[in-house]
Amino acid sequence: MSDTDLTDRLTHPRYPRSNGYDARWTIENQMGPHALWLLEWLAPALGLDTLRPGARVLDLGCGRAMTSVFLAREYDVQVTAADLWVKPDDNAVRIAEAGVDGRVLPVHVEAHDLPFAEGTFDAIVSIDAYQYFGTADLYLPTLTRLLKPGGRIGVVMPALREELPGDEPPEHLRPFWDPGFWAFHSADWWRRHWARGGTVEVETADWQPDGWKDWLLWSEVCAEESPYDWMARMARESVELVRADEGRTLGFVRVVGRRT
């Protein structure tokens, strides 16, 4: 596919800021669903008073730092790009190439062992990562202590439209089900999970309308255009999963809370 055709295929009316980023760059650095689209959906719920110029933001589970670059470019914030699996030196190269090395600091951290002082950040953001470490009842209080009073945490995750009854996946998803999917939950589940901890006021917890369609489009393009076989294989698996479901069960939720 030509670069022009690729750009046209991925230009999306809901994500005008993301449309300004090189389509091949986003494919080469993806690690799942389109992280910039998900972040652009999250940002209005966080608010410009949170993502104000100079604000300090922790991008937790940043992957290859695309979201960190986006935050720095689009909102002129200072970002700590934290990830366990991607080496900071590798992310530092991408960050410098994007021209934001003065505003994004890559670090190697594990989500349960964050080496930051209480009240360090104005905001914490996590895109397609929080479900892997944030389902434990006691996790959110340990994380929100890193926020300044009144600071916000915002996350977007693959999710369930409704909580599943019983201990078995839906019949139509059995061939594709991965044990990790049990970490997916509904917007109502996440609202209740955050609210009962008492450390945040939950301001938003909602399901993305037709988010599965964006997931399918992105996966189809990545299956065709990914530069590595393993990337293309993962994208094809996502295509099969999302086509089988068509939004009946799977999609995305965003959750935003303000430190009380």
Image: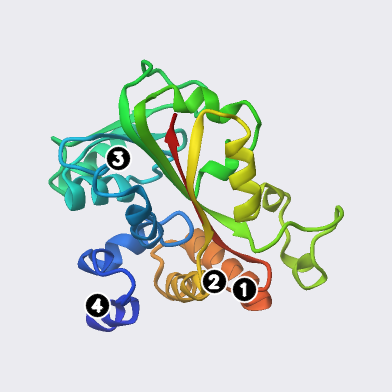
Q: CA distance from mark 2 to mark 3?
A: 29 Å
Element assignment for label 2: helix
Q: Which residue is mark 2?
A: 212
User: Residue 200: x and y, percent?
Assistant: 49, 33
**Mark toward the start of the polypeptide (4 vs 3):** 4
Q: Amino acid at mark 3?
A: Asn
Q: Amino acid at mark 2?
A: Trp
**Mark toward the start of the polypeptide (1 vs 2):** 2
4 or 1: mark nearer the eye: 1
User: How many labels were placed on the picture?
Assistant: 4
Q: Which residue is mark 3?
A: 91
**Mark toward the start of the polypeptide (2 vs 4):** 4
Q: Which residue is mark 4?
A: 3
Q: CA distance from mark 4 to mark 1?
A: 30 Å
Question: Which residue is at 34% across, 81% downward?
Answer: 9
2 or 3: mark nearer the eye: 2
Q: Amino acid at mark 1?
A: Gly
User: Residue 93: x and y, percent?
Assistant: 22, 41
Depth order, front residue of 196/83:
196
Question: Which residue is at 38% across, 60% downward?
Answer: 41
Q: Classify residue 47 as left or right of residue 60.
A: left
User: Quarter holding the C terminus?
Assistant: top left
Q: Is residue 176 something one can see in this rendering?
A: yes
Q: CA distance from mark 1 to mark 2?
A: 5 Å
**Mark toward the start of the polypeptide (4 vs 1):** 4
Q: Which residue is mark 1?
A: 247
Element assignment for label 3: helix
Q: Amino acid at mark 4?
A: Asp
2 or 4: mark nearer the eye: 2
